[in-house]
Amino acid sequence: MTSTSFSDDSSHRVVIVGGGAGGLELAAKLGRKFGTSHITLIDKSTEHIWKPSLHEVAAGTLDIHREGLSYFMLARDRRFSFVLGEIEGVDRPNRKVRLKPVLSPQGEEMVPSREIAYDTLVLAVGSRSNFFGTPGAAEHAIALDSTAQAERFRMQLMRELVLLNQRKNHEPDAILNIAIVGGGATGVELAAELLEARRGMSFYGLENFNPATDIRITLLEGSNRLLSALQPRLSQTARNLLEERGVFVATSVRVTRVTDKGLYDSNEVFYPANLCVWAAGIEAPAFLAEQGLAVNRLNQLQVDDRLRTVDADIYAMGDCAQAPWDDDNAFLPARAQVAHQQASYLVPIMQARIQGGPVPDKPFVFKDYGSLVSVGHSRGVGSLMGVLAGRSWFVEGLLARMMYMSLHIMHHMAVLGPIRTASMALGRLLLKRSTHRVKLH
Ligand SMILES: Cc1cc2nc3c(=O)[nH]c(=O)nc-3n(C[C@H](O)[C@H](O)[C@H](O)COP(=O)(O)OP(=O)(O)OC[C@H]3O[C@@H](n4cnc5c(N)ncnc54)[C@H](O)[C@@H]3O)c2cc1C
């Protein structure tokens, strides 16, 4: 079904940079209405992945080669133009974005640096892990910001498992220590996913060790409870679930340095780690702070309640934006739910800008439907906001896990449509039944 509401005479170009949870949904919705001449999406990757799945890629319970969606395929399907490239700056007076050259894995230049002209620019470049200048963290800890990093963790995990299997021949007490810094949703979900993965590891012929006792997972959190952005009851439930299954959880721990052997906290307590994951906070890409636009100390672009930056032709959304939340000086959290709602909010605004009509003047209002955290393949914990009663409801177990998955399904519906989403879901279900749960190869 295509809309005929656009005029091909208009030359207004909307350029969206960043095809993640927010930017891709916006491009897909606008592309169907206005077509390739009006809508361009730029991303530095050729494949889109739903970022909240990265901890599953890292643990080997999700195969990125099956999960990733080609931007070129999506662009053809949803009728937007796709440009592969990494933005390095914006020439605001001439309304152009500057892209770095595209290099091959061997470092050869495949596409030279370019400039892409825009009339309206939407920046949706997301965020990355913030090491807060902790010595050794960038060298020795892995962040889960991209598929490449999640794959790097998976490959190192595989290597450590093989080494552990060999060490067990002459060192019966050897164990594999995995440390996760940051007990927010990402850290908790990764710990739970590693527990799931642990169950399938001996399947690969690594039979010298017992995954349940010889792989130790440590979760370190700086504040006094896990999931500190959520209600205390959720924190306690998540902690109980992880501890019951053998995860060592320590709160009020400030990591001060990371080495190739492990981590030290502010009291010089040492936590051994063969593998370390950093999931302790975010920052937006540094180039945003160099464009003469207002940013906060995390490089996030400061936007108003209409998602406008200080430049009238530049909008920002998702993790790379700091947007106000209600009237009490709070800011919207960096969550997929926010990016998803902001994409829907920007559709009529971009439509009006393309068609030259009056731009709707309603502010963006975030509807918090609650927070859900996956703590295993049949379990989740979370709270749902009672829309009618104005209260929040605690949910746990399979119901919470299914609701957690619904955000991913809604994202696929927005970018693929219902028929492709249903066929992909069925295909994945059948593949899951026919292959082993954990991907070590
Ligand atoms: C492991 C993990 C688990 C998470 N779990 C949850 C969850 O359960 N629920 C939840 O609500 N949120 C979760 N989040 C957070 C959620 O993923 C983000 O809030 C959401 O993806 C933000 O969407 P976005 O569109 O702003 O950015 P992203 O989805 O990060 O997309 C940014 C896009 O910009 C591209 N890009 C970046 N820099 C450039 C550049 N210079 N040039 C061109 N392209 C660029 C990237 O390739 C990417 O495609 C999780 C995050 C992680 C890492």
Image (tube, rainbow, N blue to C red):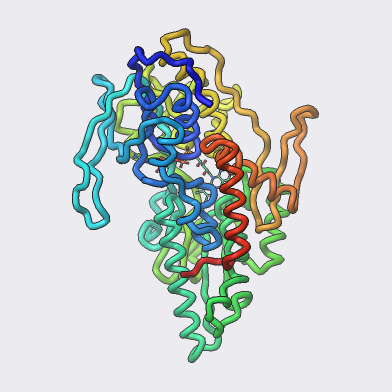
Could you tell me which residue is drawn at 39 percent across and 20 percent down?
310
Residue 40 lies left or right of residue 221; in this view the side is left
Q: Nearer the viewer, residue 432 or 245?
A: 432
Q: Residue furthest bottom?
A: 170
Could you tell me which residue is drawn at 29 percent across and 32 percent down?
290
Residue 276, position as x, y percentages in the image: 47, 63
Could you tell me which residue is drawn at 71 percent across and 66 percent down?
244
Residue 425, position as x, y percentages in the image: 60, 49
Q: Residue furthest top?
A: 358
Q: Nearer the viewer, residue 262 or 252?
A: 262
Residue 308 lies left or right of residue 420; in this view the side is left
Residue 29, above or below 44? above
Residue 316, above or below 173? above
Could you tell me which residue is drawn at 55 percent across and 51 percent down?
186
**Quadrant of the rendered structure where residue 394 is?**
top right
Q: How many marks?
A: 0
Residue 378, position as x, y percentages in the image: 70, 57
**Quadrant of the rendered structure where residue 106 is?**
bottom left
Residue 400 lies left or right of residue 99; in this view the side is right
For residue 266, say whether it is visible: no
Residue 295, above or below 379? above
Q: Residue furthest front?
A: 1
Q: Nearer the viewer, residue 374 or 109?
A: 109
For residue 185, say whether it is visible: yes
Residue 431, position as x, y percentages in the image: 58, 59
